[in-house]
Image: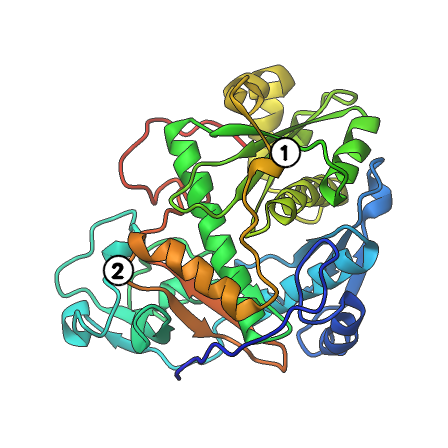
Amino acid sequence: MAITIRPVEKLYFDGTHRSRSPEETRAAVEPLMTEIGVTEIIDVTPLDRIGIPVFAAVRPGAARGAARVHAGKGKEPVHARVSAMMEALERYCAEYRGDRMECATYEEIGPGRAVHPEDLLLPRKLEQGEMVHWTPAWDLLNGEEIYVPSNAVFHPYDSLGMAFPLFRSDTNGLASGNVIEEAILHALFEVIERDALSIADQKRDLGRRLVIEKECAAREVIDRFEENGIDIHLWLLDGKTGIPTVAAAADDTVTKDPAMLVMGSGTHLSPEIAALRALTEVAQSRGSYLQGGANDPQREMVIRKAGYERLKRINRIWFADAETVDITAVPDASTRRFDLDIQQVLEEIGPHTDRVCVCDLSRTAVPVVRVVVPGFEVSYMDPGRKRAEQGEDLPRF
């Protein structure tokens, strides 16, 4: 199952880097929606006063424990529609469908052939001789096949009664693309993004405030928020790598709705695209909440109980003063080829891990991958999986 990274030119650069235009991607992906169980694609944009494009793909037959509504965002409506469809495709492909899994102890598989489960930051200790499901992957750093715990590959993970789950499965490092190189790059970006968020959350330090004055797509989106009374607080996070990770916190000063204290984040070699992804993710979070398709009733109850002012105090680091950096001072290391971008990212990741594992989960003509990077933090998504206890978990973004 060797994965070869081929030279692939980027052909589309408006707000994102892709090997096809959004219209071409839509033509390729839309016919697959029936096959993967998507029954409806909804334009959620009109539900919010800001008018930033957000779409939702509804998949009623999603596996138990998986989301049934998949949101998409973008600079233009076609971007958001394609984003929602691609997310639905990713989630469909991540569900276990009788895929090959080995059931063995770590000792039986062998240290040279497998990622140690504890390198994935487990919320509990791995028992000696504990049975674990394993899935083959390709290690991009070492150019060899490697086994990774299936719990880190499939979502929702089903132990089939043969093993104890290692942790709550998630979608970190799951991505699709027009070509597999595009999918791998975006999966790598997501792993780096969640790692940077986790580190910032644990340290209670978001790095520097990001200022965008130049004319660009991100600036246009900020203006749209501000025209509608929504304050945007942009941060350039300090992660393990030098790859820009931008986080955006939004404060709706008009409604003062605590549920509208939302954040978004994005990682990309281009700081402008990282910022745009963070901003459009804020719009996506607002749209998803207003649609009611992805709301967690328990979380909503906690948010309502806390109220607007208290929730702002709990999350005050997002609104605090800090040193600033202008986006023009943040280096843009993106290239015109996906393989070269992947090479750049691997050079940044390499000093912090022994392996970069890629599982090809493609089940249609559209490539879908899961990237697993041992040692990279995921506690922002799952507070149980962190290196050291940080005290009580408070309601936050």
Q: Which residue is nearer to you in this view: 304 or 6?
A: 6
Rendered location of residue 337, percent (x, y): 58, 68
Snapshot colouring: rainbow
Q: Residue at x 29, y 47 (%)?
A: 123
- Which residue is denoted by mark 2 in the rendering? 117
- Mark number for residue 185? none
Residue 10's spot in the image, x, y percent? Answer: 65, 68
The local crowd at label 2, few if under 14, some if 14 to 19, many if 20 or more residues have their Cα within 10 Å, is some
The amino acid beneath tag 2 is Pro
Q: How many marks?
A: 2
| Residue 264, percent from left and from top | 61, 40
Q: Position of residue 168 (x, y in %)?
A: 40, 53
Q: Is residue 173 visible?
A: no
Report the side of 107 relative to 350 (left or right).
Answer: left
Helix or strand or loop: what does disc 2 sit on?
helix
- Rendered-image quadrant of the C terminus: top right
Q: Is residue 278 left or right of residue 127?
A: right
Find residue 357 and report its image quarter: bottom left
Marked residue nearer the N-terminal end (1 or 2): 2
Position of residue 198 relative to residue 71, above or below, is above
The residue positioned 28% from the left and 41% from the top of the image is 387
Identify residue for label 1: 262
Relative vertical location of residue 258 with respect to residue 128 in this rendering, above or below: above
Is label 1 in a helix, a strand or a loop?
Answer: strand
Residue at image point 26% right, 60% down: 117
Answer whether labels 1 and 2 touch (C-beta < 8 Å).
no
Mark-to-mark CA distance, 1 and 2: 33 Å
In the rendered image, which quarter contains the N terminus?
Answer: bottom left
What residue type is disc 1 on? Val
Instruction: Confirm whether residue 8 shows in the render.
Output: yes
